[in-house]
Image (spheres, rainbow, N blue to C red):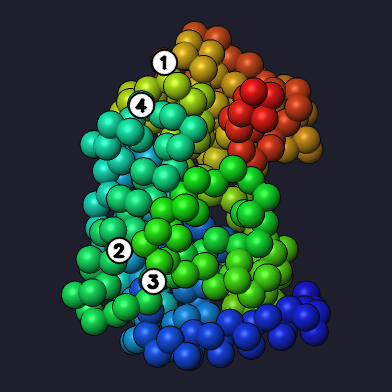
Amino acid sequence: MEISPSQKAKLQSLKDLLTSWGCCAIAYSGGVDSTFLLAVAHETLGEKCLAVIATSSTYPKREYLPAIEWLKKNGIRYERIISEELDIPEFRDNPPQRCYFCKKELFIKVRNISEKHGIKVIADGANLDDAGDFRPGMQAAKELDVKSPLKELGFSKEDIRQLSSAVYNLPTAFRQAMACMASRIPYGSPITPEKLRQVEEVEDFLAAKGFKTFRARHHGDVLRIELAGEDMPSAVQNAAEIVIAAKKAGFIYVTLDLEGFRSGSMNEILNRE
């Protein structure tokens, strides 16, 4: 895959910015964006780059464990922290501003760790495309002076995927965009360990069946599955197995959303309101 001159220029600008920082801590989730940022930061700064990865009940094991393995495989210095959002009432009650409280908790803990290592600059993987969605967590980043170099330098999701593949050969290059499992639960419906367990069980099953792009949305007794359009026929063919897995997880009714997968679909209620 060829990268464009503009993508080459953006990558060089990113390296120059990281070099100017001297050292930094990256809030690393194992997703497409933070993995790319961390790969560039590690290449540019070496041991002066620290990855900070958080464990929580909203972070599925199928994503967390490969993220840790990638860090180890590439010899990247990292610290693990616990960021249990369910201990925060404002998050647990699941208001539209939920993400703000989650990110504030996370970034405070990342800053505490980075300061112990003498690191002043913290960065996250937010990119240009994130500015077009409802993301209250960005306010927390701003308040705590967390940098978003990919967004600042104009990296789109497509830029990140292409550079991840063509330049760094990252396993995340074409992986589905990650999102906190709390995003599967409608605003106003309290977030509980049981609901998160149900979502994780169904999504683990869908991943094991080979589906690449999916969300298991929790609507009480009803499971609403979102899939990419090309996966719809496979879902119909495997309907019986999907229903069994969903009912085993605790759902009573199982639905397939005919509109298909769309990131942030739970925000559609906010747009209507």
In contact (CB < 8 Å): disc 2 and disc 3: yes
Amino acid on which disc 4 is placed: Asp
- Mark 2 element type: helix
Residue 74 place in picture, x, y as percent: 41, 77
Q: Is residue 228 visible?
A: yes
Q: Residues within 10 Å of mark 3 (few under 14, many from 20)?
A: many
Residue 54 place in picture, x, y as percent: 32, 55
The tag earlier along the polypeptide, 4 or 2, is 4
Q: Is residue 172 visible?
A: no
Q: Label 3 belongs to which residue?
A: 122
- Give the alpha-carbon distance from disc 4 to disc 2, as whole Å: 24 Å
The tag earlier along the polypeptide, 4 or 3, is 4
Q: Residues within 10 Å of mark 2 (few under 14, many from 20)?
A: many
Amino acid on which disc 1 is placed: Gly
Q: Label 4 belongs to which residue?
A: 93
Q: Label 1 belongs to which residue?
A: 250
- Mark 3 element type: strand
Amino acid on which disc 3 is placed: Ile
Report the residue that reaches farthest toward the front: 143
Residue 228 place in picture, x, y as percent: 72, 38
Count of picture labels: 4
Amino acid on which disc 2 is placed: Val
Mark closer to the observer (3, 1)? 3
Mark closer to the observer (2, 1)? 2
- Give the alpha-carbon distance from disc 1 to disc 4, as whole Å: 21 Å
